[in-house]
Image (tube, coloured by chain):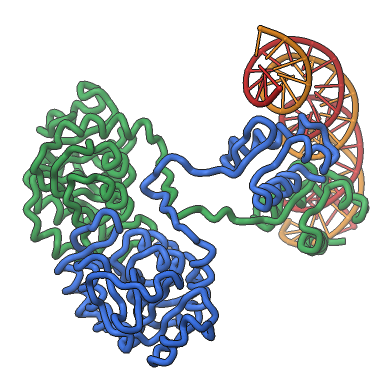
Chain colours: A blue, B green, C orange, D red
DNA sequence: TTAAAAAATGCAAAATAATGCAAACAATAA
DNA sequence: TTATTGTTTGCATTATTTTGCATTTTTTAA
């Protein structure tokens, strides 16, 4: 067995069981504990895991780097956005709002997609700057620090001049009666402008956003074309939404 | 058996078994291990596989995180930008260009600085979004992917309307005769606009940029107020620059 | 504090790799 | 044809890497 294989084995086991024990690995791989320890030290120095007394645990980034954006429930979000990939086509003009769900979406956009994408979210722009085939346009303005998006009149002005085929809009809250609602006023008006500017409006969010509301209205449910959650479209929770005419993906 | 055939054989086996072992291949193909090693080295340099001690494993391109920006010679750059911190004052309106030196600068800006900062660089904006006391304005436009900055007429238009106290401008190249010069045309005109918009112009760069030139002119040396390098201001290399009236920090 | 477990260190044997070199072979031009 | 040139291959030598063992040091838990 090659060393590289062993390292893979260790990393896989670590991922599955959240920890590895030196003695167990030595037994499982029929090698001396010294060798295992050396492996763990190597992987540790590569920051692929964290060596501890007796074995190793998963590596957790602690330096709160600005560039290290924490996405919680990333797997759930991947599930959501993967469904939405089918809505993408070459030649589209796309507007994307901010939010971690949209960031995950940006990560998964296939690299051969030829499209024009407008966004006002720094992390999403960083991510999309990796895509050789998308024309990326950043909508400038005053930065809202915590959300890492631009806001204000500058943004509205630019957005209102775009003629987009589709927009992907994050959601703070959604309910059948209130429609899309937002925590912040400024974000809510930017999203209104996005919806105005787009042929088709898609909103992606986790099911825990369903049937909640926030102070600032964005739009009625009827103005949304498609909503995407991690649930099965036929799920009972979504029935009311389906009835009101939104396409549930 | 031709070498090309052998390579195909190796790649097929690798695909099937996820790894290949040098000694096994030598036996199977009835060749010396040396030849197999040479084959593996070739395939490795073509990035078709990854050679490891004892054989080879499948090539996996390490998904270089977009958000992980590599800064080379960071210590040197820290030295440079630390000197420039003395140029910052509360209440200033500042424009910052892109570049890794400016990124390091952004990291070291004291968190109590109350200023308005304009930038058109994604990483710098990400970094500055950590500063609670700076008003941050991102200048939007079409993204230039590799440099992670916006370029084009949109940028020029916004920049030309700013009245800034000071601008910090990265440099591809600088020489006494040619002044500041840039690799890219688009970046050069944005920088021209920055200089026009600012009372004071500061350029920070490593000394290896001194006495080099690039195709696109940005400005004469006389248009710069201050230059900052890692060298001692009295260093002989900088004498010509001092003589021409630029303040060397 | 102490005893046991685990880890680090130095060392040597074995395996693997790199390097220089020469023979074998093919392709090409005189 | 012959000479020349370049590539490929195997061998000998040297260098590097890996691994296990003995020993010492550190850590853990009672």
Q: Residue D9 at what x, y percent from top left?
A: 86, 49
Residue at 36%, 59% in the rendered image: A123
- Looking at the image, which residue is at 82% across and 42% down? A29
Residue A238: percent from left, percent from top:
46, 83
The one of B77 and A58 positioned closer to us in this rendering: A58
Q: Which image quarter is the N terminus of chain B in? A: bottom right
Query: Does residue B25 sit above or below A203 in this rendering?
Result: above
Q: Which residue is depicted at the point 75% across and 50% down?
A: B56
Q: Looking at the image, can residue B152 be seen?
A: no
Q: Quadrant of residue A126?
A: bottom left
**Residue B150, relative to residue B130: is it above or below?**
below
Residue A154 seen: yes
Quarter of the figure with residue A160: bottom left
The x, y position of residue B112, in whole percent, is 18, 37
Which is nearer the eye, A74 or C25?
Answer: A74
Which quadrant is the C terminus of chain B positioned in?
A: top left
Relative to D7, is B212 on the left or the right?
left
Q: x%, y% of residue B68?
A: 44, 49
Residue pictured at 11% horizontal, 37% vertical: B89
């Amino acid at each position: 067995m090659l060393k590289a294989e062993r390292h893979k084995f260790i990393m896989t086991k670590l991922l599955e069981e959240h920890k590895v024990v030196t003695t167990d690995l030595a037994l499982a791989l029929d090698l001396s504990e010294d060798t295992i320890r050396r492996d763990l030290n190597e992987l540790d120095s590569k920051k692929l895991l964290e060596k501890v007394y007796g074995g190793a645990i998963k590596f957790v980034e602690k330096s709160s780097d600005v560039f290290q954006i924490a996405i919680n429930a990333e797997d759930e979000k991947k599930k959501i956005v993967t469904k939405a990939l089918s809505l993408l086509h070459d030649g589209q003009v796309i507007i994307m709002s901010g939010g971690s769900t949209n960031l995950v979406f940006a990560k998964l956009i296939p690299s051969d997609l030829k499209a024009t994408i407008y966004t006002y979210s720094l992390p999403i722009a960083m991510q999309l700057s990796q895509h050789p085939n998308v024309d990326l346009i950043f909508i400038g303005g005053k930065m809202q620090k915590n959300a890492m998006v631009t806001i204000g009149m500058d943004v509205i002005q630019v957005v209102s001049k775009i003629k987009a085929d589709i927009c992907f809009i994050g959601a703070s809250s959604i309910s059948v009666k209130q429609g899309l609602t937002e925590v912040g006023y400024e974000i809510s008006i930017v999203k209104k402008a996005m919806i105005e500017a787009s042929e088709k409006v898609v909103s992606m969010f986790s099911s825990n956003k369903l049937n909640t509301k926030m102070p600032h209205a964005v739009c009625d449910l009827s103005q949304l074309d498609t909503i995407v959650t991690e649930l099965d479209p036929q799920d009972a929770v979504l029935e009311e939404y389906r009835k009101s005419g939104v396409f549930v993906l």
